[in-house]
Image (spheres, rainbow, N blue to C red):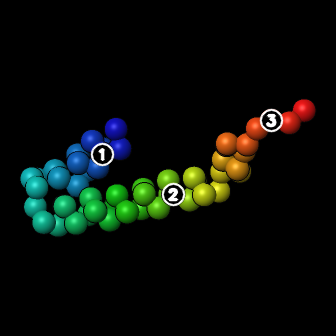
Amino acid sequence: MIASAANGLFLKSGAMTMGIHQIAIFSDGISFILIMITLLDRSLSKVGHKNQF
């Protein structure tokens, strides 16, 4: 859904070089946000560990 929104936002008048560059910058920003969310997720440290009661 994000990709479709980016295409609609940046490629309104056709697939021109500037629009493609803007999509690349937008994709870099979204990727950075998703990587940061993953790295800061404390619940991932529990994955793979056996529960000991």
Q: Residue at x 41, y 62 (%)?
A: 29
The residue sitting at the top extreme is 53
Quadrant in which the N terminus appears: top left
Residue 39 in view, yes or no? yes
Vertical relation: 18 (above or below) 10: below
The one of 50 and 3 positioned closer to us in this rendering: 50
> Which amino acid does the dot numbered 3 rest on?
Asn
Tell me the mark number nearer the camera, choosing from 2 and 3: 3
How many numbered discs sit on the rendered protein? 3
Q: Is residue 16 left or right of 1 when viewed as pictured?
A: left
Q: Is residue 47 left or right of 17 when viewed as pictured?
A: right
Task: Say which quarter of the image contains residue 40.
Answer: bottom right
Residue 37 coordinates in the image, percent (x, y): 58, 53
Q: Which residue is mark 1?
A: 3
Q: Residue at x 70, y 50 (%)?
A: 45
Residue 2 coordinates in the image, percent (x, y): 35, 44
Q: CA distance from mark 1 to mark 3?
A: 39 Å
Quadrant in which the C terminus appears: top right
Residue 17 coordinates in the image, percent (x, y): 13, 66
Residue 35 got which mark?
2
> Which amino acid does the dot numbered 1 rest on?
Ala
Number of residues whose C-alpha sits closer than 10 Å to that of mark 2, classed few (under 14), some (14–19) or many (20 or more): few
The one of 7 and 33 positioned closer to us in this rendering: 33
